[in-house]
Image (cartoon, rainbow, N blue to C red):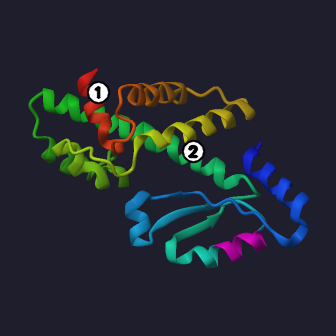
Amino acid sequence: MLGPGVRKLAEDLTARFGERIYVVDAPVSGGEDGAKAGTLSIMLGGSQALCERASEALAPCGTSVRLGELGSGQVAKACNQLVVSATIFALGEASVLAERSGLDLEAMWDLLGHGYASSRLLDSRKDRLVSGDDSPSGAIKYMRKDLHGANEIAEATETNVVLLPQLRAAIEEVIDAGLGDRDISVTKRFVAER
């Protein structure tokens, strides 16, 4: 079942306005940095023709790709946030483990950034993880709704997920600790203070 919310929205709008309005879902990834640089990843869901029109309009914002019918963008966003949340928690935990073991955190991330641990997330948050600067930027609290959506998709597709329940619980714990407005790199502080 693809993006039930956006499909319901499309049905409601069509019932109210007929063919005067069309719906394409187009969630994005890349955060504030990607928005400023025009390098967002735009996940399109909808008919081929509508997605082509949307892609042209969204070109200044980044790269758009049609992933399937209406709702596909929402599924892709949920998958993206599953990977992002798992990665940022792993980076936070690894940073605390390394620091408490006496490693030079910056040197470690520079080295590991050339291997399989490399990621755009490590590249964009390495300095914050090293310095401990989790001042607001991409607030971690927004992952709550995306992981909720991922859970709905898992239930609808009868997928017995492993990480998702743990990540949802961890996000709730971060928010309950009063850290929800902090940057996603707050996972380092969160782990250190548990």
Q: Tag 1: residue type? A: Val
Does residue 51 belong to the magenta stretch?
A: yes
SS for callout 1: helix
Q: Which mark is residue 79?
A: 2
Residue 117, quarter of picture: top left
Which region of the structure is painted magenta?
Answer: 48-54
Q: Residue at x 18, y 32 (%)?
A: 98
Between residue 68 and residue 51, name the one nearer to us: 51
Q: Position of residue 140 (x, y in %)?
A: 41, 41
Q: Earlier in the sequence, mark 1 or mark 2?
A: 2
Q: Tag 2: residue type? A: Cys
Q: Quickly name the residue at label 1.
A: 191
SS for callout 2: helix
Mark 2 closeness class: few <14, some 14–19, many ≥20 residues within 10 Å: some
Q: Residue at x 59, y 57 (%)?
A: 27
Q: Is residue 10 above or below residue 152?
A: below
